Image (spheres, rainbow, N blue to C red):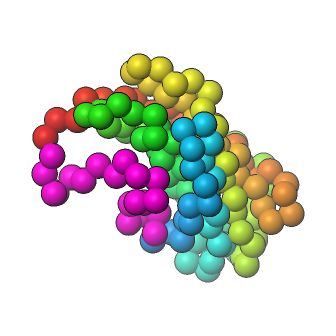
């Protein structure tokens, strides 16, 4: 595998995107992944709440982390489909918490559901994503 395309198998070794949005890994097992992300001005929309794209990015990263934890050596993944239901806003200064659980761990696909909550524990969004499992070609 070339250095240009490193596969990040260790849950603690998060991609630059996750670092950029402030996603912090809280815990990770093959059955459950949890992240926290502060809601900053840089991640807010014009209404002063967490941007939907930031929510989706946090959830995609969490589900992708879980997928990698369930892959055999020589396999990789990419998001095939993602659906988000936005239920409540998360305001500036709050913290978004994402908990991802596998719904399906198959040979060619994995499906992860991520529940994103606000600091008060209320559900802000539910994201369901399908990850395609692929052979890594160098």
Seen at 78% across and 61% down, the residue is: 118
Residue drawn at (56%, 61%), measured in percent from left and top?
Answer: 25
Total residue callouts: 0
User: Is residue 55 at all visible to an observer of this figure?
Assistant: no
Image location of residue 102, percent across then percent down: 60, 32
Q: Bounds of the magenta span? A: 1-19
Residue under the point 57% across and 24% down:
104
**Side of 22 relative to 137 (left or right):** right
Magenta highlight on residue 12: yes
Query: Which residue occupies the foreground of this view, 76 or 131?
Result: 76
Magenta stretch: helix, strand or loop mostly:
loop
Q: Is residue 63 left or right of residue 122?
A: left
On the image, the x and y values in percent for residue 22 come to 54, 71
Which of the 4 image quarters holds residue 51? Answer: bottom right
Q: Which residue occupies the extreme top position in the image? A: 107
**80 versus 38 height, above or below:** above
Task: Out of 118 and 14, give the one closest to the viewer.
Answer: 14
Front-most of residues 59 and 32: 32
Name the one closer to the observer, 69 or 119.
69
For the C terminus, the quadrant is: top left
Residue 42 vs 83, above or below: the answer is below
Q: Is residue 86 left or right of residue 79?
A: right
Tell me what residue is drawn at x 29 percent, y 49 percent. Answer: 7
| Residue 129 appears in the picture as rendered | yes
- How far across and how far down the image is residue 3, in percent? 16, 57
Q: Position of residue 105 (x, y in %)?
A: 52, 25
């Amino acid at each position: 595998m070339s250095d240009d395309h490193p596969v990040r198998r260790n849950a603690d070794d998060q991609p630059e995107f996750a670092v950029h949005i402030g996603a912090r890994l809280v815990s990770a097992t093959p059955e459950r992944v949890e992240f926290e992300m502060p809601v900053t001005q840089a991640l807010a929309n014009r209404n002063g709440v967490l941007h939907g794209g930031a929510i989706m990015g946090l959830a995609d990263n969490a589900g992708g982390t879980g997928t990698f934890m369930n892959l055999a050596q020589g396999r990789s993944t990419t998001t095939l489909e993602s659906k988000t239901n936005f239920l409540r806003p998360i305001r500036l200064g709050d913290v978004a918490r994402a908990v991802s659980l596998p719904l399906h761990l198959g040979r060619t696909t994995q499906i992860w559901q991520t529940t994103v909550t606000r600091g008060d524990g209320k559900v802000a969004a539910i994201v369901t994503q399908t990850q395609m499992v692929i052979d890594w070609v160098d």
